[in-house]
Amino acid sequence: MENKNISKAVIGVLVVLVVLLGGYIAVSGGKSAATANGASEAAALPMETYQAQYVKPETPIDRSKNVTLPGWGGFTIPAKTKKITQGFEFHNPAENLWYEDWVSIDGTPLEKLVVDSGQTAELSHYLRLAGIQADVTKVLDADPAFFDIQKNDAGAYTIEAVKGYKGEKTLTVQADDGKQYTLTLTGKEECYYIAFGLYLEDGDELLFQSGLVAPGLYVQKMEMTRALAPGEYPAYVVCQPYLSDRTTKTNSGIVKLTLTVG
């Protein structure tokens, strides 16, 4: 009798354990499913409403004019005097004076064109610099005396500045977005000044340093630091160009020559 009671008790305990285990599995499965569903819902973020195709921003092109430096084979100057008025030549080539046209849209400067340089630019390039994603389909007005408008092999309109001026001129274009845009081209005179330094190779001795020489002009006389005895001296000239602000230096050039003193 006692054994039967024990057996019944054991069976009862087992039944309770089975019921509890089943409930645990059900609850765990529910939590896992809820977690999985929750993670899935969290990953599915809403799409950004304001989207558009990415277009790489246009960047300005450096169309700066290179400086033109003079060249010499040698100088022949008089001996035993520091004041020299002949036999040398420090000149700034006239090519170092030019005109630039700064292109702007709605008052925002975009890029410059060097006049009479052979440089061309697509008109659509300026629209993109201004953040306008459109292509020029027609040029409505442009002064042919100052601007040469052409179509390149790809069918894009190009502009070349062919004559210098001071002040503003405008150019209106039609674009494929159905709008018209006005480009303002502001012309200004630009130049490179050059300062000349005459050195002896022996000890890099400075004999003469000029001030700034304007394009198309030359140094009429130089007063050297000392007079030289007759003979031939290996020498060199340092040509230091400056921008039109007369302060900013650009890349200098060195010209070697023979200084003949007699």
Image (cartoon, helix red, strand yellow):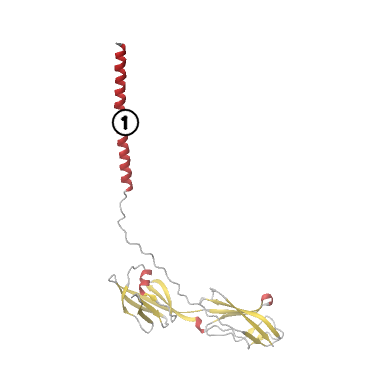
Judge whether 33 appears above or below 122 on screen: above
The image shows residue 81 at horizontal and vertical percentages of 69, 86
The image shows residue 148 at horizontal and vertical percentages of 37, 81
Question: In the displayed image of the protein, which residue is found farthest to the top?
Answer: 1
Q: Is residue 201 left or right of residue 142?
A: right
To which quarter of the image does residue 70 belong?
Answer: bottom right
Looking at the image, which residue is at 30% across and 39% down?
Answer: 33
To which quarter of the image does residue 172 belong?
Answer: bottom left
Of residues 194 and 122, the one nearer the viewer is: 122
Looking at the image, which residue is at 31% across and 11% down?
Answer: 2
Judge whether 94 appears above or below 48 on screen: below
- Identify the image quadrant of the C terminus: bottom right
Q: Is residue 246 left or right of residue 45?
A: right
The amino acid at mark 1 is: Tyr
Question: In the displayed image of the protein, which residue is found farthest to the right?
Answer: 229
Circle 1 is placed at which residue position? 24
**Can residue 102 be seen in the rendering of this structure?**
yes
Looking at the image, which residue is at 32% across and 25% down?
Answer: 17
Of residues 99 and 257, the one nearer the viewer is: 257
- Identify the image quadrant of the N terminus: top left
Judge whether 28 appears above or below 2 on screen: below
To which quarter of the image does residue 141 belong?
Answer: bottom left
Helix, strand or loop at disc 1?
helix
Judge whether 144 appears above or below 46 on screen: below
The image shows residue 135 at horizontal and vertical percentages of 32, 71
